[in-house]
Image (spheres, helix red, strand yellow):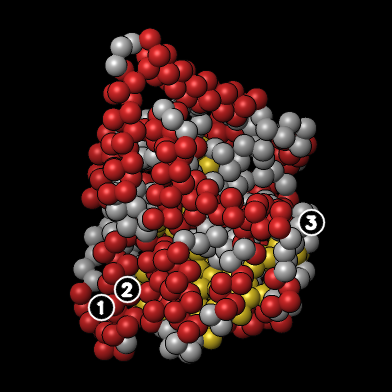
Amino acid sequence: MKPQTETGRLCKASRKRPYIPFRFLLAIFLAALETAAIIGIVFTLCRYVPYFYLLAWLTEIACVIQIIASDDNPDYKAPWLLLVLVVPVAGFMLYFLFYSRKLKPKYVKRLGSIKAQSYQKDDQKLLEDLKSESSVAAAQAKMLCAIAETHLFSNTAQTYFPLGEAMLPRLLEDLKGARKFIYMEYFIIEEGVFWNSVLAVLKEKAAAGVDVKVVYDDIGCMTTLSGDYFRTLRRLGIDSVPFSHLKGNADSEFNNRSHRKITVVDGRIGYTGGINLADEYINHVVKFGHWKDVAVRLEGEAVWELTKLFLIDYGINVRKPPEIRPELFPTQDVSAAGYLVPFGDGPNPIYKRRVGKSVIQNMLSGAARYVRITTPYLIIDNDLCTDIENAALRGVDVRIVVPHIPDKKLIFCMTRSFYRRLMDAGVRIYEYEPGFLHAKSYLADDEIAMIGTINLDYRSLAHHFENGVWMYRCESIKDLKADIEDTMNKSIEIAPDDLKSGLLQGMIRSVARIFAPLL
């Protein structure tokens, strides 16, 4: 058939692209050139304009004071202070260019408009019901709703998928059943069996009049899709836009990435988790051994929040804001146990507080018996590290599972640098022996869980746009627990004798950890 031939041709062509496409190299070059030009001008003024160096010196002092006095995490302050103090002039210029997040005023206004036009919900009655079951869970849900501007839901069915290949058939079935709209947002899309099977359905649905929208991260897909792939999708009838299209500006655009994974079908069915739309996520291709990832399917009104998050991300990346219609948030009659809070997370100034980090900290502080964590990376600040230690020290059985086969060796080296400190407090650490563990799941006491896109690293906890689902006494929690236990059975538990490292490796880890918040 013609669509299959075209899809196959596109896939074949994509594999011939260079490792880093020219457009991205050009953007990096322009950003570096702009940065160098600005720093060069300041250096020249310091040398040739009388007393200008005094102004530069006072500016450096002001930068140091501003960094120290800011509300930012001390772990984030430290590398910037080092940079400003050790590298004269260039240090504070880099601070001015890259420290704070920038979002155009028109997009800030648009973001507020989309939020205001989306669904409205009163959580008071549901919070009272939850409080009657658990004051700890109710407090966590209330705080999460406040800091993420989201809502508490019940009567939403969940299906847990322990692997990408388990999710794919159900995802295709749901996409084929779409009647009104399909919204998909992913950090990585790569042409192959997974994406091409999804794309075939999307093309068919778009041709039938279904509103199909796709958002993919521009940097996340820089080695997997052509720079104008959104135009290819538009020619197929699919409304597509890259998130934060890279232009080579000397600002925070390299950090403003969407790591979210969202699928919404008709506002009734939603998917999220760690699974991107590429073949390693269904183990069709092997990159780092067996690829272990998880996802959750929601059916019910909790899907409304996933719809809202998609519309916000789509809306700030297109010229014309999307039309927000009531039918995007349909009422549903679904009977299911438990409470859910779907939520988004992201950088300042869009999110005033670190949402994902707060969820994890609350789970740790509220746990009485055990906490289980699966994450591909373990690069955390002192606050979160202390919270994990404190949970273990008061007798909570804390176990963390990370990959045994890494995708990034430097990051894996940094992950292992946290083992000793955590293990000294009683935390048990496992490495998933069959391959690369990409799952981001958090479980406490058989009752509270969180599944989403949030890794235990600075990218997820401070820089990226992320999303997740907090759950209390939901049916899928028992499936998550069984899967984590099965994963630990396939993993190697790290022993104290495994922690030995050489002098050079120790120095590399120390330097890398200083600048980890900026990576």
**Residue holding disc 3:** 286
Which dot, 2 or 1, sits closer to the camera?
2
Closer to the camera, 216 or 493?
A: 493
Q: Position of residue 492 (x, y in %)?
A: 73, 76
Q: Position of residue 489 (x, y in %)?
A: 71, 82
**Residue holding disc 1:** 127
Q: Position of residue 58 (x, y in %)?
A: 28, 30
**Residue holding disc 2:** 141
- Report the amino acid beneath label 1: Leu
CA gap, disc 2 and disc 1:
8 Å
Mark 3 vs 2, N-terminal side: 2
- Report the amino acid beneath label 3: Val
CA gap, disc 3 and disc 2:
39 Å
Residue drawn 46% across the image and 61% down it:
381
- Report the amino acid beneath label 2: Ala
Q: Are marks 1 and 3 in contact (CB under 8 Å)?
A: no
Q: Are marks 2 and 1 in contact (CB under 8 Å)?
A: yes
